[in-house]
Amino acid sequence: MLKFFKFEAHGTTLARETMAGVTTFAAMAYILVVNPLILSNAGMDTQAVIIATGLAAALGCFLMAFLTNYPIALAPGMGTNAYFAFIIVLGMGLSWQAALSLTFWNGIVFLILSLSGFRKKLAEAIPLGLQVGIQAGIGFFIALLGLKAAGIVTASPATIITHGNMTSPPILLAIGGLFLMCILSAKKIPGAILLSMVALAIGGFFVAGPDGATLTSKPDGIVGVPSGLGATFMQLDWFYPFVNPASLKIMFVLLILDLFDSLGTIIGVSRRAKLVDAEGKLPKMDRALTADALATVGGAIFGTSTTTSFIESAAGVEAGGRTGFTSLVVGILFLLSLFFYPLIIAVPAIATAPALIFVGLLMGQSLRDIPYDDFTETLTALLTALAIPLFFSITHGLAIGLLLYLVMQIATGKAKQVNWLTYVIGAIFIAFYAFG
């Protein structure tokens, strides 16, 4: 094991790599609770999705560990799970089986692009302003879902949306949990989200909801044997994209989200771990993206939305993780955690809502990367970030941002500076609007 992961060459030890794995797991374990909660809105069995989430995360971590030897952990991603449940299924009316099929084929296409090298051309075709706007917009979208779930934001016929009863105990508990997450993260305490969720779950025993019952109910036990995966395993509507060509635009959005989420995380974490070469390039980038794609394919078969690299891997890197053994430890811990699913199920929604808000705020930090010296890129980023939560659609937010970019480039005499593939993508969106 020491020779395979090259501990000596990376200047690390077994103890350090193990602790780094534990640190990364603590930082991202919240996904075991949050992902099933989100996908349950699509009608999926919560217990089955818990198992699928753990298995997909473990598979992704193992693939990354053995294909790349990088300390990057994977799990079903935030943002794409919300897109899956709230937009594809609830918004567009597709079945969750069809959405799983789109996720599966997205993984296959992503794998082909990774192996062929075309993914680099696709990445270059998306303007920086649009990339930033997509990430921030998804963050604001997730935060909006969390605010709504906590009751902090509610519908209003007069003002469209408004605040809830800010003095009600459940809302005060949620706000307190959000503040706690922010404080712990500011102090750089590993597992800030998980620790805050545990505190909220405990607090839920002493706070009653509108029905008079406590927000947190007593769990059936601590240890339980996982069961119920059959409700989602291999339940894909396998050939849905082929008999419904209009769904290809959904798959395109999934591909774009997966591509930039993966690229951004892998590059960011690898730089912190000093894995890049003298030219600032990651030697095994293609292998890392291949692991990411294979994890998405496997996750869809298990029964969950897109599996991707997690930025929380940076927590393990800060703890000293430098090799794939860190990822291996994370994968093992995800498998072991499944045997404590009675505790996972017992976590109330009031404990997960602040996590959604917090993760959304973190994603919103990408606005600092807007190239403010380029007026076209700036407006593209801001319109995209604003449109995604307001349209309640990542697809339409991406489309209007890209079309604004193209129109402004043409109108200002910079049409020749635009990548040809960017025009192709814009034409695809126009065709979908015109004929779809």
Image (cartoon, rainbow, N blue to C red):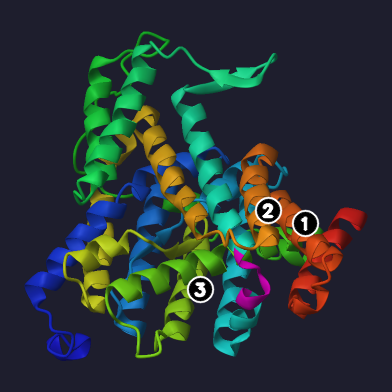
Residue type (three-letter) at the residue carrying disc 2: Leu
Please provide percent x and percent y for residue 63.
37, 76
Q: Residue at x 60, y 89 (%)?
A: 116
Q: Nearer the viewer, residue 178 or 105?
A: 178
Please provide percent x and percent y for residue 358.
39, 41
Mark 2–mark 1 Cα distance, whole angstroms, equals 8 Å
Mark 1–mark 3 Cα distance, whole angstroms, equals 30 Å
Mark 2, secondary structure of its residue: helix
Count residues near mark 3 (Cα–Cα under 10 Å), then give few for <14, some for 14-19, many for 20+.
many
Q: Is residue 80 magenta?
A: no
Q: Residue at x 72, y 61 (%)?
A: 240
Earlier-in-chain disc, 1 versus 3: 3
Task: Decide if residue 24 is in sight here.
Answer: yes
Choose mark 2 or mark 1, whichever is in front: 2
The residue that label 2 is drawn on is: 379
Q: Taking 169 as reference, is 108 above or below it?
A: below
The residue that label 3 is drawn on is: 293
Q: Main secondary structure of the magenta part?
A: helix
Start-end of magenta stretch: 123-128
**Relative to 436, is 24 on the left or the right?**
left
Q: Residue at x 25, y 57 (%)?
A: 25
Earlier-in-chain disc, 3 versus 2: 3
The residue that label 1 is drawn on is: 404
